[in-house]
Amino acid sequence: MNTRLGTYGDPSIKTPHIDALANQGIQFDRAYVQYPQCAQSRASFLTGLYPNQTGVVGASGLKKDFRDKVPLTKTLPQVFQDNGYHTARVGKIFHQMVPKGIGQETYDDKISWDERHNPKGIDRTRVAEIQYLGPLVTEATKKSNMNGGWLSYMRLGGTSNDYTDGRVTEQAISILEENAKIQSTQPLFLAVGYVRPHVPFSAPERFFDLYPLDDIIIEDVPEFDRNDIPSAHLSDRPYQLDMTDQEKRIMIQAYYASISFIDEQVGKLIKKLEELKLKESTLIIFVSDHGFLLGEHELWQKPNLFENTLRIPLIISDPRSAKAGLSSDSLIELIDIYPTILELSDLKIPEHVLGRSFAKLINRPSMPFRKSALSQSHARVTQPNLKKENIFGYSLRTEQFRYTEWAKGTHGTELYDHTNDSGENTNLSSHDAYQDVEAELRRLLRERIAESEVSPNQITER
């Protein structure tokens, strides 16, 4: 989920329940992920370690287990377990292939949970009805897309509870109802993981109806936008550059429908908290694992190092805060969520955690926090002039700039000035007027990369 949400300033997206949650909490406008891909991001922020430390990196990261490299690390839910909480997971929290892994445990970290649930709806049982974009759809393509890589969608009709995410909500509500009976004896850590928005986009028909195709605005990409983007960063799939405007509208409509569907689920959960009189004793964190491109730079999906894949929605509702309804412009990394939740819960933060708690921002949202946010990714090599090898990129976001290097600069560098280029359309790297700025950002990036590579061998917790 990217920040195309009502509360983040997009009036075309209908997200009344997420907007309402933001009005009840603090909205963080500059929260950035460590890695714009599901498995890598989740392994990072749920362990409090950077991707280089978990070992979950690269194109093969989707099938890696962080415990292969850091078997003793303590995950966020494990810390709650150790402090007497009942930990429950519903849906996708650690990695899960979509749609193939829906309803299965696959890459879950089982020891993190006292209770695990894997709902499955018609968006999994009727995968034969996935509608693909592109003329070259083969049986091999369909098999590959079971891991969720191809632009696709499903229009299956039905009610919300026929779908996986609707069933996730129902199971979470059941857990809340059971917990309400024993609230005085055992607190609850509940992780609710929704599949959407993730290809194949899927939602009941009424959510598609919210977004007539004729009303959807497609990205107006400047004519020469891609000329100064390094080849390592152009992750085009074969059909995407040939998409018609109508095909683009169809995919955006399906994405928006998925967003509004999830918004409904968020509303149901919060309503149940209120009905059970649990809201005033519950800390709510709403967050995405990474963003998503919808035609910017003529690119779609992930794992690019652009603003729209790295910036995520993050809302924290703390019933004790006197600043509800405000927003913060402070730079935050997703790895910071682990220590922040623990501090807000009055629990000790494990020594291995490299993230920094931003708990003070809940009551002082305008105070400065980080000077930069570090992200990394791998090149999805589709360009004919690049060898099929692991090419890694690192990106640094400061208050004004984004600076990116691919393979330490040997495969290209990028510099964008957000003062007048929020769309990151003009690469200023190597421009004479920005030489000093780039040199300083390069130094800072190398410093932050070194921090992210500190050996995790000193971790001794279970």
Image: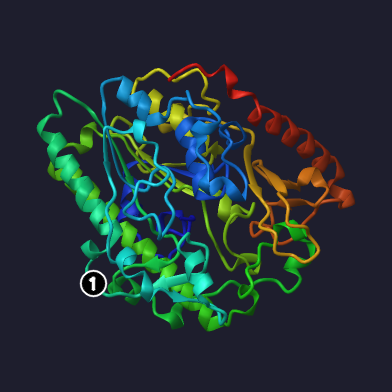
Q: Residue furthest right?
A: 432
Q: Residue furthest front?
A: 139
**Which residue: 46% across, 77% down?**
250
Comparing 351 with 100, the one in front is 100
Location of residue 144 with respect to 315 vertically, above or below: below
16 sits to left or right of 69 = left
Q: Amino acid at mark 1?
A: Gly
Comparing 269 with 71, the one in front is 71
- Residue 90 x %, y %: 29, 45
Query: Residue tagged by mark 1?
Result: 158
- Residue 462 x %, y %: 43, 20
- Residue 452 x %, y %: 64, 31
The reply to whether residue 30 is visible in this rendering is: no
Comparing 240 with 346, the one in front is 240
65 sits to left or right of 278 = right
**Which residue: 49% across, 77% down?**
249
**Quarter residue 253 falls in:** bottom left
The reply to whether residue 215 is visible in this rendering is: yes
Comparing 2 with 133, the one in front is 133
**Quarter residue 136 falls in:** bottom right
